[in-house]
Amino acid sequence: MTINTEHFKEKLKAELKIVETELESVGRKNPSNPLDWEAKEGDIDVDVAEEAEIAEGIEQYENNSAILKQLETRYNEVKDALAKIDLGTYGICEISGLPIEEDRLEANPAARTCKAHMND
Ligand SMILES: [Zn+2]
């Protein structure tokens, strides 16, 4: 059985777009390294900000950083999966080298491993 890579390519591309939009809502591309994202600070005017506002801004920055980290990980997974499609190695378990179950790919098109190795 061969996997319909075109189908998964479309799914991955759609997901990449969503993740990119989400990344833009909590972060911005690092101007000196476009592959790197940094979290947005809260919108505060430091000159006039009250202490509470500064604390709020910092909290927002920390929340954004946490979300950003997760999104970045997902972004890279999806990018890797797309690269594998181009290389012809898509849908192969990175641990056993066996084909990844189609329903697993359907649930997570960026899966790197088969069901037997999904927690490794
Ligand atoms: Zn495996």
Image (spheres, rainbow, N blue to C red):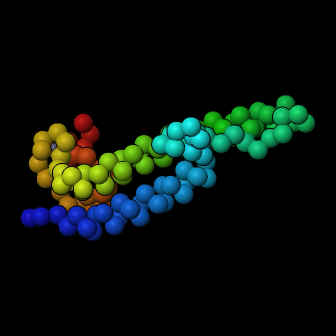
The quadrant in which residue 38 appears is top right
User: In the depicted view, which residue is nearer to us: 7 or 70?
Assistant: 7
User: Residue 98: x percent and y percent?
Assistant: 11, 48
Quadrant containing the C terminus is: top left
In the rendered image of this protein, does residue 59 appear above or below residue 83?
Answer: above
Q: Is residue 59 left or right of residue 71?
A: right
Quadrant containing the N terminus is: bottom left
Question: Residue placed farthest to the top in the image?
Answer: 51
The answer to whether one can see residue 108 in this image is yes
The answer to whether one can see residue 66 in this image is no
Question: Residue placed farthest to the front in the image?
Answer: 32
User: Residue 28: x percent and y percent?
Assistant: 60, 46
Q: Is residue 5 left or right of residue 31?
A: left
* Image quarter where ligand 1 lies: top left
User: Residue 42: x percent and y percent?
Assistant: 73, 42
In the rendered image of this protein, does residue 92 appear above or below residue 17?
Answer: above
The quadrant in which residue 13 appears is bottom left
At a point 71% along the width and 34% down the height, the residue shown is: 58
User: In the depicted view, which residue is nearer to us: 69 or 36?
Assistant: 36
The quadrant in which residue 106 appears is bottom left
At a point 24% along the width and 56% down the height, the residue shown is: 85
User: Residue 10: x percent and y percent?
Assistant: 34, 67
Q: Is residue 21 left or right of residue 94?
A: right
